Image: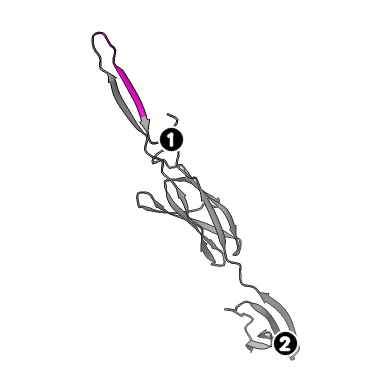
Amino acid sequence: GEYLYELRLGTSVVKRYNASPVFDKLTAGDYTVYVKDGLGCESSVSAKLDNPKPIDVKISATPKLTCFDNEDGVVTIDLVTGGSGNYTFTLHGVLTDGSVTVEQSQGARKFTGLKAGTYYVAVNDTWTCTNDSNKAVIDQPDLVEARLEIVTTETCRKAPVLRLTAVGGTGPY
């Protein structure tokens, strides 16, 4: 036989008896669904709808590249909670040269091969909840620069003496 369905929130009728068992665009609350058959017999079931917990995400990054202009930075997703639990991650970055990068995760909670810049991760879930992480910075070390100084020039009696020094980069040299 045919059934009729009604939805109530507490004692308020949200959707009067009708043939559709679909109730959409609902807010959080304690609902009761009533069903009535062709003879007027009625039954009900309770359903509690909760709002999802907001997504919370925290990231960290390699503090500094190993050498100037390397691409060995790493952004790690340290914590992600809330939402449906089924997440996708998108890395957004502004590099030190001003260019912008956007990279989809392949499922890992780590993005590797990154240049110096400021990054954040956008998280989405299967319920269309979304949130952005904190920002994390990967610094660029100073460019290593070699300096060659002639201490003594060559003569017939003396060999030349040269002094090589380095500045920038990361010592020891």
Q: Residue furthest bottom?
A: 40
The C terminus lies in quadrant = top left
Category of crowding for the residue at label 2, using alpha-carbon neighbours closer than 10 angstroms: few (below 14), some (14–19), many (at least 20): few
Name the secondary structure under disc 2.
loop
Residue 16, given in percent of the width and then of the height, sits at 63, 89
Q: Is residue 90 above or below residue 52?
A: above
Residue 82, given in percent of the width and then of the height, sits at 60, 63
Give the residue drawn at x 74%, y 91%.
Answer: 40
First in sequence: mark 1 or mark 2? 2
In the picture, the disc for residue 42 is none
Closest to the camera, between mark 1 and mark 2, is 1
**Magenta region: which residues?**
156-165
According to the image, label 1 marks what residue? Answer: 170
Give the residue drawn at x 61%, y 72%.
Answer: 51
According to the image, label 2 marks what residue? Answer: 37
Amino acid type indicated by mark 1 = Thr
Q: Residue furthest top?
A: 157
Give the residue drawn at x 73%, y 80%.
Answer: 45
Question: Which picture quadrant has residue 141?
Answer: top left
The N terminus lies in quadrant = bottom right
Amino acid type indicated by mark 2 = Asp
